[in-house]
Image: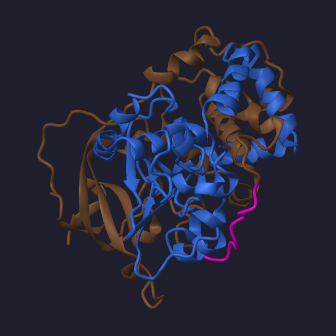
Chain colours: A brown, B blue
Amino acid sequence: MDGIHDLGGRQGFGKVDVDEKEEAFHSDWEARAYGIVRAMSKPSDWTLDKFRFTREQIEPVVYLSRPYYDQWLQSYAALMVGSGVASVEELATGKSDGGKAGLGAPRGPESVAAEKRAAAVQFDRPYDKPFRFDRGAAVRTKPFAHKGHTRLPSYIRGHEGRVIEVRGAFIFPDEAAQGIERAEPMYTVAFAAADIWPGEDLDHAVHLDLWESYLEPA
Amino acid sequence: MSANQEKEASDIHHELHSHLPPEPALRVKAIESLLIEKGMLDPATVDAWVETYSEKIGPKCGAAIVARAWADPEFKARLLENGTEAVKEMESAGWAVAHLRVVENTEDVHNLIVCTLCSCYPHAILGPPPNWYKMAAYRSRAVREPRVVLQEFGVDLPDNIDLRVWDSTSELRYFVLPQRPAGTEDWDEEHLASIVTRNSMIGTDRDLDPSGGDK
């Protein structure tokens, strides 16, 4: 989806606020929102990419202006409505019309410490088919775009780069956002910024992790 | 990925935007109350997450990893080879990261981390990202004009430095191993960790100041 979230290389957003105070949370509600999102029960089909795709569909002006954790919460609220777990009315009032989500008991505080080492979610999968590219391969990103979720940013489409690492097979986000779990090879690809934005006197390299479906031989 | 589904989610967003309270604090409160009533949330678990990410997980965890890498060349080799496995050796390294990739700054190389599509960041090691990391200015510019962005952070990179920007488009989480400054040769890990800044592990800081520590 060519949405507002796809910000790489866009211009006109001004300077970075480098004077921000270094603290975990900048307000009580922000801390609360973060904690809620981490603690809440989620149906198993709310994959990370489904969440991302939901956030990508926040109205552009809201996406750019609303605080980040507020957007997280808004995205979970939208997922709740979309999954039939809650209605807009219930979310607006904070009062349940009586229905339970049916997701079992909520996780207790002991679940937090239990996640310390155990619960990092793995996104790589076994894969027994051949990988199309080796380290060092010259590749070109496909020019495609589609209406769904993708992790191929628009600024890199149609450009030539070089595979610097073969990472293994990872769940393919474009399909994971639709609830389909299929792994495919994923590669770290280096691009010369001067090729992406010619005429700007650039000398750096940009690296992206890209799935095999995004690439063709150069 | 039907167009219908896209329409549906944006319609829901629109409805939520029109009906939920305009103040973030009130929205958060309404959603928390509802989740509790729905049996989806234990408020004590929210408290525990907030406490963990306010006090236990944060840049000091990353600094401990950097200090260990500076002090122990074999650990550093393991960290660069397989960051995910290497940090499991350390109790003070924060929480598990499924796929951690550590990139090393040297005399000739500088690394900078960004996520142009959302705000992927090694939360489990560095805590919540700074606001600027999540905002459009950084996300749009870090890939296109990183030297200018670095100047805004007070980092003037010499022209001959090999500048590598990492756009976190997958579930690999990137982490910069900054350079160890001269004059710290006989320091222990705790002392070394005290001079490691959060920004140096994102790449928006470079030359760490040996007089900047707390000892």
Q: Would you identify the image quadrant in which residue A29 lies? A: top right
Residue plotted at (82% across, 35% down)? A28
Q: Which image quadrant is residue A128 in? A: top left
Whether B209 is drawn above or below B63: the answer is below
Residue that appears at 25% across and 60% down: A164
The quadrant of the rendering that contains the C terminus of chain A is: bottom left
Most extreme residue toward the front is: B186
User: In the rendered view, would you say B131 is above or below A110?
Assistant: below
Q: Is residue A121 left or right of residue A81?
A: left
Q: Position of residue B24 (x, y in %)?
A: 83, 41
Give the mark count: 0
Magenta span of residues:
A11-20
Question: Does the stretch in magenta take in B59?
Answer: no
Which residue is more in the foreground, A174 or A8?
Answer: A8
Tell me: residue B141, above or below residue A35.
Answer: below
Left or right: A43 with respect to B179?
right
Overall secondary structure of the magenta section: loop
